[in-house]
Amino acid sequence: MKYIIIIGITLIVTLLVSKLLMAVELVHFNKFGKEASSNLTKTEQLINIGKSTYLVHCTSCHGKDGKGNKEKAHNHTKRIAKKSVLDVINNGSNNLKSIYPSGMPAGLLKEDEAKEVAKYVANDLNGKKPKGWKTCSTCHDDSGEGINLIAPNIKNYSDDLVMTVLTNGKKGVIGTMPNFKDSLSIRQMKALAAYIRSIQIETK
């Protein structure tokens, strides 16, 4: 009987010590996690959320590297491709009317001018400005960064543009992009915009 009591007390003490050690480790783990997170800027934290969201919702079409699965989807490492610019210049676009009500009219540039502008825009607006850019800059601004309620940023991925595409979907020369308005929060959409900007490759 004496030995049973001793064994029982030993087991209880062992369990209590083990629980105490687990609690200490958990507190340490949580503290470390918060410290690690606090070492990141808000932008870095947003990019991390965006990367996780991208891996879950976007890689099946755009690929893990964001390059579009051999042109099956848009290449997110570049703001826009030459053929996409040409398609919009020639055919116009009303995909983004929720934030740019007037849309993009078709045929503002002649064939050769359209090709020159498409090349310029696809090259991140680097190099000599083509003659036709003057027509484009009246709406997209000379910087290419767009004008509120008039035309979108065609140089970088703005929050407004990414959030609008995610909310409404988009049709383009590659195909149709579905909307994600019911599966993504506003914060996740902003995080995706931040992440996509972080993988954009600038050409010089």
Image (cartoon, helix red, strand yellow):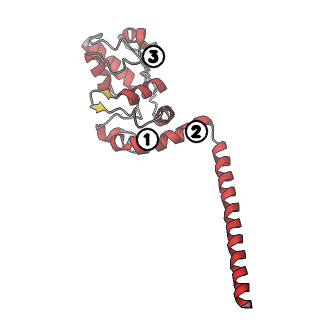
From the viewer's perspective, tell me whether residue 177 is left or right of residue 156: left
Q: Quadrant of the N terminus?
A: bottom right
Residue 39's place in the image compared with 93, above or below, is below
Name the residue: 48% across, 42% down: 51
What amino acid does circle 2 point to?
A: Glu
What is the residue that sits farthest to the front in this orientation? 1
Label 2 crowd (10 A; few <14 / some 14-19 / many >=20): some
Question: If you read the primary sequence from the N terminus, does the residue marked by circle 1 or circle 2 appear first?
Answer: 2
Pointer 2 residue? 44
Q: Position of residue 93 (x, y in %)?
A: 30, 18
Report, in whole angstroms, how far the alpha carbon at label 2 lies from the one at label 3.
25 Å
Pointer 3 residue? 146
Residue 105's place in the image compared with 165, above or below, is above
Q: Which mark is residue 54?
A: 1
Report, in whole angstroms, how far the alpha carbon at label 1 lies from the one at label 3.
25 Å
Query: Picture quarter containing residue 9?
Result: bottom right
Q: Nearer the viewer, residue 178 or 6?
A: 6
SS type, badge 2? helix
Q: Nearer the viewer, residue 55 or 116?
A: 55
Name the residue: 70% across, 70% down: 16
SS type, badge 1? helix
What amino acid does circle 1 point to?
A: Tyr
SS type, badge 3? loop
